[in-house]
Image (cartoon, grey):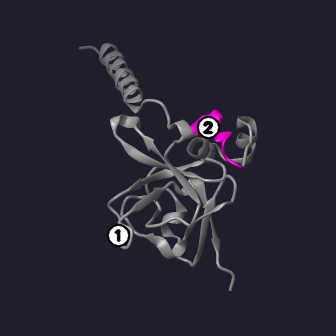
Amino acid sequence: MDHTRRRALTIGGLGVLGYVGLSLRGPRTSMASEAAHAAFPVKHTADEWRKMLTPQQYDVLRESGTERPYSSPLNNEHREGVFDCAGCKKDLFSSKTKFESGTGWPSFWQPLDAAIVTETDSTFGMKRTAVACASCGGHLGHVFDDGPKPTGLRYCMNGVAMTFKPVKA
């Protein structure tokens, strides 16, 4: 087989795999739609969010994307403080509930009171529970039932969707 034909077959195969992957992924969670976000107290248009957020923050918070595992500096944040929404600054998680899950994303066993909302997410052909900010509806990550005591939950959050505010000394 000549080099040009092999290359064409490889590129075609990768294209089919990409299409299949996107098809299995399905639509983003419904909390990501602009209509769904209208129900949250903090509201901005898509253009306003794009101006306020970095492209990666916009992808995660507004389009339910996911950052690469082990890419967030918040994985190594061990100071006392609060993790808040990168979109609207609502306090979400106390550092006291953060734990090392080994998953590559900042993980917590409990959110702050009234900080988050959840919804069933069936993207990628699996059923999960998506987590969003209760103020702006920004997608934060997912919650799983394999966490530590006392809740047994693991809130697996995208670090890019949050910022950290240390306790002032």
Q: Which residue is drawn at 47% across and 66% down?
A: 110
Which residue is more in the foreground, 110 or 160? 110
Crowd band around label 2 with a 10 angstrom C-alpha radius: few (<14), some (14–19), many (20+): few
Is residue 37 one of those drawn in magenta?
A: yes
136 up-or-down from 46: above or below: below
39 up-or-down from 1: above or below: below
Residue 152, picture quadrant: bottom left
Q: Which kind of residue does numbered mark 2 sit on? A: Ala
Residue where numbered disc 2 is placed: 36
The single residue placed furthest to the bottom in the displayed view is 169
Q: In this view, does 16 lie to the left or right of 42?
A: left
Q: Which residue is drawn at 39% across and 25% down?
A: 23
Of mark 1 and mark 2, the one earlier in the sequence is 2
What distance separates the C-alpha of mark 1 from that of mark 2?
A: 32 Å
Question: In the image, which residues are magenta?
Answer: 32-41
Q: In this view, does 120 lie to the left or right of 147?
A: right
Residue where numbered disc 1 is placed: 148
Q: Position of residue 1 (x, y in %)?
A: 23, 14
Q: Which kind of residue does numbered mark 1 sit on? A: Pro
34 up-or-down from 61: above or below: above
Is residue 147 one of those drawn in magenta?
A: no
Crowd band around label 1 with a 10 angstrom C-alpha radius: few (<14), some (14–19), many (20+): some
Q: How many labels does the image show?
A: 2
Q: Position of residue 161 (x, y in %)?
A: 58, 53
Helix, strand or loop at disc 2?
helix
Q: Is residue 70 left or right of residue 40?
A: left
Q: Where is residue 28 in the image (x, y as percent from the top left)?
A: 50, 35
